[in-house]
Image (cartoon, coloured by chain):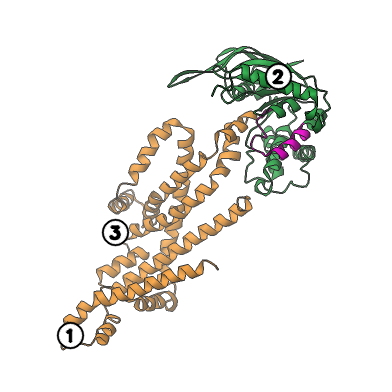
Chain colours: A orange, B green
Amino acid sequence: MRNLFPILTVLAAIVGLWYLGAVWMNSAWTLDRAEGPLSFTEVVRDTMSQDRPRLPAPHQVAAELYDTVIDKKVTSKRSLVYHGWITLRSTLTGFALGTLIGILMAVGIVYSRTANMSLMPWAIISQTVPIVALAPMIIVLMAAIGVEGRAVPKAIISAYLCYFPVLVGMVKGLRAPDRAQLDLMDTYSANGWQTFWKLRLPSSVPYLFTSLKIGIAAALVGTIVGELPTGAVQGLGARILIGDQFGQPIMIWAALSAAAVLAGILVTVVAAVQTGLMRRMGFAQ
Amino acid sequence: MTVVKADDLALTFQTNDGPVHALADVNLTVEKGDFVSFIGPSGCGKTTFLRCIAGLETPTGGSLTVNGMTPDEARRSRAYGYVFQAAGLYPWRTIAGNVRLPLEIMGYSRAEMAERIARVLELVELSGFEKKYPWQLSGGMQQRASIARALAFDADILLMDEPFGALDEIVRDHLNEQLLKLWARTEKTICFVTHSIPEAVYLSTRIVVMSPRPGRITDVIESPLPRERPLDIRDSTQFLEVAHRVREGLRAGHAYDQ
């Protein structure tokens, strides 16, 4: 793995900075409580092991992760695997929905001038509305029309964030064929469906996957935002919220780390599918 | 039999800078089995004329028929194969897959597709490259594959727009020789756009010299060369005489003004 070394280097740098930050941010609390003068070593030792640190040290988060991922049964309400699964399920639903909407809108925009002029501005405006403001409304509206639970509104919020990069990438991809390639289809007197299926769609695949990698990360963010508003009890977002309400920074950071790992895995999986498909299609050199 | 007939053909593009006369007063007939080259400087309308024949551009004046039909009807009846300057093979299709493209669109049976792919790849000497992807082939081979693609559905007319323009001279010589053999074997009618005087003279039975502003025909030269043409015919006096006349025609059309 040629790529592993740089990744590990950056990771080591982050962990190093994180430790420095933990000492710096937690030392105030240590010094406030101190009854006498403390040596530097004593201050550092204390900042590493507070119960409610401002910034938990990496090993504290790691220990919490170990406890809630490995030690707890996956069915337990305190298991991060359980909450991660809830989040993953909504993310994938939202991702599928968002991708579908993005592709359909892109096809409409590429083929219809009216759709291009009417849909595109709204698609851009939709992304300027802060999702944190919109999320509670979507949840309330879903409840009002009688949809039980959080799964559906979460998937909708997730799709809302995810469709946009897919839309933009697909529009670019479907428009990728140049004049000569389109003329060639005309010389065969190919119909619109054949031009779409045999030229535009295959041309768009590289663009689509670039967008899907952004899209799946956005879908995860959307799901977590959907789990944040008061009332959620399941999912990584809910863990962050509960950690905040009960003053448990270690819990918050563990959930955050789990979300980051989940995002990394999802993007890696999409990238692997991309590599495989591109090779099968003969794009790879 | 007349394949292409143009009478007082004109095409004017309306642009922001006023009208551009891409073609004016073009009169030409192409007979079945002809190899007609269009030569002239950029902007003389040679590509535009080819695109008119193909029904990819619509003339604004005069009349144009292809196989007795309007160019658009001819296009819809798949009367011609078109070869572009860039090979334009689909990177996600193998060579066989690229040649299969027009056959899929035209709805040939699976067995017939396989038979035709094998036949036209043999014709352009690419047998054995069926499963290669375009990026695995040289530029000259890619252009041969695109010619095979244009031949696959047995159109009687082959329209070629500077197909060898981007290739080096050695490859180009070789492909010119191959193209003549292919023309002799298939008895197609070929309309061929080029920048190169030796290429035009070597390949053609008729050479159409064009000049710009407005795009028009300044000379039509019937080649006295025999149909059988080895490469060294290019050193013969006859060849040089024709080349000279083409050059004179280009000069007369003020082609070298700029």
In front here: B81 or A5? A5
Q: Chain of mark 3?
A: A
Instruction: Pinpoint residue A27: horizontal percent, then vertical percent.
Output: 23, 78
B171 to B36, vertically: above or below: below
Q: Is residue B148 magenta?
A: no
Determine which residue is flagged by label 1. Answer: A34
Bounds of the magenta span?
Answer: B156-179
Q: Quadrant of the N terminus of chain B?
A: top right
Residue B156 visible: no
Do labels 1 and 2 touch, CB within 8 Å? Answer: no
Q: Chain of mark 2?
A: B
**Crowd tier of the residue under label 1, counting other residues whose Cα lies within 10 Å: few below 14, some 14–19, many 20 or above:** few
Q: CA distance from mark 2 to mark 3?
A: 84 Å
Q: Residue at x 79, y 37 (%)?
A: B123
Q: Chain of mark 1?
A: A
Q: Residue at x 49, y 51 (%)?
A: A210
Q: Is residue B160 magenta?
A: yes
In front here: A127 or A41? A41
Q: Are dots 1 and 2 on a single chain?
A: no
Q: CA distance from mark 1 to mark 2?
A: 104 Å
Q: Of helix, strand and loop, which one carries label 3?
A: loop
Disc assigned to residue A229:
3
Instruction: Pinpoint residue A34: horizontal percent, then vertical percent.
Output: 17, 85
Determine which residue is flagged by label 2. Answer: B245
Instruction: Pinpoint residue A261: horizontal percent, then vertical percent.
Output: 43, 67
Q: Which is in the foreground here, disc 1 or disc 3?
A: 1
B96 to B62, vertically: above or below: below
Callout 3 amino acid: Pro
Q: CA distance from mark 1 to mark 3?
A: 38 Å
